Amino acid sequence: MRAHRRIRLLLYDFTRGGLGTPEHDEVQRHLAGCASCRRELDGLRQILSHLPATPPDPAADRPPDFWRELLDAVERQLPPPPIHAPRFLQFVAFIDDITGPVRRPSLALGAVALLVISGVVSWQLLRHEPPPPVARTTVAPSTAPPAVTSRSADTRVQDYLRKSRILLVGIANMPTRKDEPLDLKPEREASRALVREARYLRQQDIDPRSERLMKDMEKVLITLSNIREQTAFPELAIIRGGIERENLLFKIRITETLYDRITDAGQHEQP
Amino acid sequence: MPAAEEQHLLQEAKEGSHDAYRRLVERHMRQAYNVAYGFVHDRDSARDIVQDALARAFVALPTFRGDAEFGTWLHRIVMNLSLNHIRSTTAKAKREVPVTGATEPGHDHEPERHSTEVQAHIERALHELPTLQRAVVTLRHIEGMSTKQVSAILHCSEGTVKTHLSRGLTKLRSKLAFLQEDAL
């Protein structure tokens, strides 16, 4: 019985010439001595004679417009392509773009206006409030990364502020192009590094203003660290909203100004 | 399309390039249409199924690991959507199969009309097959795919494909017995 069942499963390929020599011979031998399977084969041949002998090609009679319209319709259904992001290092070039030769007057004008307003406001604040003391801390060798153990905490805070400013300015001004993929890997890596650095610095004895700023920055940086590239459009908008809501660029600039003053004062005190 | 070129387009499409995806599916959409048509026997429905399948495939591309060929993967999506379409319209489809004049097949002396009627009977018989048997008969016999390709699309063994093909053809033979008698 098992032999009949096995042979009947091979009959289709037998009729189509799709069996290898050993199986073909096996089927022929079986058919020679089995009337039941011969009847099965005859029946199969009859039904196959009614089915299309060659594969039909309904696609063949469709006009070229049909396929073009189909692809257009599909494309309209697709989610928007991710946008291309400049590499982290290109942020610096981007800043140079708007601070160097004026190739984009409106952008450069906006940046200048922002700097002027920041300067006026920070001057007003600093005139009435003495800058908070910035603690000069000793970096614990056991927790600091080996490569920077010799750097003081305030230098590292300044470095953190500079990198954060560059990163956030880049994100806030990131050009979006519909037809280019978005690659935020460098930005994600930079954000992770900044989050790690902030967590380390907040354990040190740094000034309260910087500590508050790092806390405000953390949520935005973590969101950026975990951004998913496939859904970058909405998440990028969230990050930009966070930068604007928390007024992070302004706070960074103010804190940087304080550190600049301290650095200048320190240099003047030196003999 | 060379495998390397297809891989390149696939990678770009995975990264979200519409243009790469368009070029990629241009090579597969005709067979995808034929597969869909083989199931639903309706041009508009086949077009809708292919359009839906291509849109879904793009969204699902990040999950495509390349275990099978892209074409096989796409045909599987087309087949699933076709079967869903058939399930949702089975009763209607049965009613709509053109059986006019089918009561007396063979008594019509116009060869062209007779051929159309025979085709209608075959389509109806195919529609009445259980889902898997219909899928195997359509892909294996009508579309001319190999047992291995069909097993990849249906995610089953080659033995299972052969079993469903054998059973499906036996049922077709039973349903279309009158055609055989007529032919004799």
Image (spheres, coloured by chain):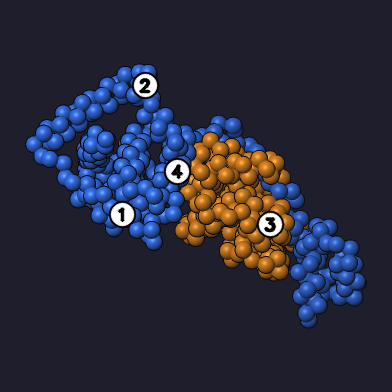
Chain colours: A blue, B orange
Question: Residue at label 4?
Answer: A186
Q: Chain of mark 3?
A: B
**Above/below status of A83 relative to A231:** above
Task: State the image coordinates of residue B176 (x, y, percent, origin top left).
Answer: 68, 62
Between label 4 and label 1, give the one nearer the viewer.
1
Query: Which residue is farthest front?
Result: A271
Question: Residue at label 2?
Answer: A100
Tell me the kind of residue under disc 2: Gly
Report the quarter where the N terminus of chain A lies: bottom right
Q: Is residue B41 left or right of residue A53?
A: left
Tell me if residue B106 can be seen: no
Residue situated in front as seen by the camera: B165 or A151: A151
Which sits earlier in the primary sequence, circle 1 or circle 2?
Answer: 2
Task: State the image coordinates of residue B1 (x, y, percent, origin top left).
Answer: 68, 40
Question: Residue at label 3?
Answer: B149
Q: CA–CA distance between discs 3 and 4?
A: 42 Å
Q: Chain of mark 2?
A: A
Q: CA–CA distance between discs 3 and 2?
A: 61 Å
Question: Residue at label 1?
Answer: A138
Element on which disc 3 rests: helix
Q: CA–CA distance between discs 3 and 1?
A: 68 Å
Q: CA–CA distance between discs 1 and 2?
A: 39 Å
